Amino acid sequence: MQETRLAYLFNRYFDKTASAAERDEFLALVDQEEVEQEIRRLMEESYQGFQPMQQPFAEGDREKMLSAIVKGQVEEGKVIPLKSKRLWPRIASVAAILLVVGIGFYFYNPSSSSDDQSLALADQHIKPGKNTATLTLADGRKIVLSDAVNGELAKEGGVSIQKTKDGKVIYTVEGKSEEQANAERALRLNTITTAAGEQYQVILPDGTLVWLNASSSLKYPSTFSGNERKVELDGEGYFEVTKVKDHRMPFIVVGNRQRVEVLGTHFNMNSYADENATKTTLLEGSVSVSASNTSSILKPGQQAISVNGKTRVVQVQTEDVVAWKNGYFMFNNESLEDVMRKVARWYDVQVEYKNVSNRKITFFGTVSRFSNISQVLRTLEHTGEVKFDIEGRRIIVIEK
C-alpha cells in the first residue's frame, strides 16, 4: 500500500469529499495495524483543532459509534445503534484515530462557535505548552533546556550529558571506566523539572526513554549501579524501560502512593500530588505495582489505581492514557474538574469555579494539545453545560 494513497484517502475522508468507494477503502485501511503510525503522522500534519460532539455519549455509545464508523453506518448528526458483538481488539486500539477522523468530522458544527471576545483575546497571551524543561545537576547548576545549544551540556563523574538535535537529554559514560563512574553515582543525582506548559524527553544512563508531562519532575542518578535502577517521579511520565542483562537490577519508579518495579517494559505513571489517585497503566510487558501493603502484577491494558491506601486494577483504553505523549488530550468520561486540571497544567493558567453546582459533569472527545485555548474552551461550551470567562491567565468556569 502506497503512503501517498493513504494520504490521499485521509484528506478526502477528512474534507468530506470522498466517494463511497474511497470512504470504504479508507475505513478498511484504518483497520490495518501497519498503517497506524502513518495515520498518526497525517493527523499531526492536518488536524489542528478539537472537533466537538454536540452531546456526550451515554454508557456504551462510544463502542457503538466506533463500530458504526468502521462499518460505514454513521449518518450526519446521528448514531445508528448496532446489535453486533463487542468490538474486536484491533478496533478498540484505533479508537483515537476514529474519534478524531470520524466522530469529530461528522459532529462538527462551525456555526455554533462562541462569540465571546474574551476567548478570542485569550489566544494572544495564553499559548499551548512547549518542549522544554530545567535540568538541575548534582552540583546545583541549572540548565534551561530550551535555551541550551545542542551538544554537550555538562560532565559529571565520567558521564557526558548531551542535548540532541531532536530535543532529548542523553547520558553516556566516558572518560572513566563504568565501575569508576558508578562509584561516584551516589553523589550525582540529577533532576529534570517541567513547569506548567512544558514537556520534555530524557534518555537515562541505562538507555530508558522517559517522556515527562507538564508540572512534573524526575530525579535519577547520572549512572545506575548496585542492585536496582531507581528514579523518583512527581507528576506524570511515560517510560520505555531498557532491559539489562542483569535480571537482578530492576527498574524502579517511586511516585506518590505507588512504587513500580519492572525489568523492561512500557508503562505510564500519573502521580500528581493534586490528584486524588495515582495511576500506573501498562502498555507492554509486565510490571509490579506496590502501594501500602498490597502488590499487583499488571497485564497490558490494565491500570492500577491507588486511593487512600487501597489499590484496584481495571481495564482501560491505553490510547486515552498516553494521548498526552502523542500530542492530544483524550477525554473519555472525564469530569469537568479532571479536564480543567489538564488544561491548567498545559496552558499554565489558573482555574476558578463560579456558581458551578456539578463539577462532575463528564466529557468525551479529542483535542490537539497544540490548539489555541479558545478552541478547547469553545468546544467544552458546545456541550451546553458550562461557559468560560477569561481574565488575564485566569479561566473562570460558569454553569450555563
Image: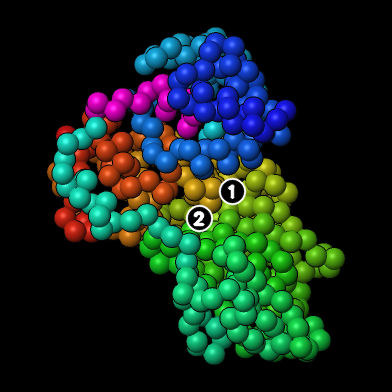
Whether residue 86 is visible here, answered yes or no, is no
Q: Say which element carries label 2.
A: strand
* Magenta span of residues: 99-112
Q: Position of residue 69 (x, y in %)?
A: 52, 19
* Predominant SS along the magenta part: helix
How many residues crowd around disc 2 within 10 Å: few (fewer than 14), some, or many (20 or more)?
Answer: many
| In this rendering, position of residue 134 left or right of residue 209 | left
- Is 6 within the magenta? no
- Residue name at image x 49 percent, y 48 percent: 327
- Gap between marks 2 and 1, in whole Å? 9 Å
Left or right of 97, for residue 348: left
Name which residue lies at 58% across and 41% down: 41
Local SS, label 1? strand
Name the amino acid type tagged 1.
Answer: Thr
What's the residue type where badge 2 is placed? Asn
Q: Quadrant of the C terminus?
A: top left
Judging by the rendered image, the residue that carries numbered circle 1 is: 281
Taking depth in this image into account, of 111 and 90 the one nearest to the observer is 111
Q: Look at the image and tell me in which quarter the N terminus lies.
A: top right
Q: Position of residue 252 (x, y in %)?
A: 66, 65
Judge whether residue 104 is colored magenta: yes
Q: Earlier in the sequence, mark 2 or mark 1?
A: 2
Which residue reaches farthest right? 245
Q: Is residue 324 left or right of residue 364?
A: right
What residue is pinned by disc 2? 270
Residue 383 appears anywhere in the view: yes
Q: Residue at x 54, y 90 (%)?
A: 139
- Specify the quadrant of the image occupied by residue 166: bottom right
Depth check: 236 or 169 in front?
Answer: 169
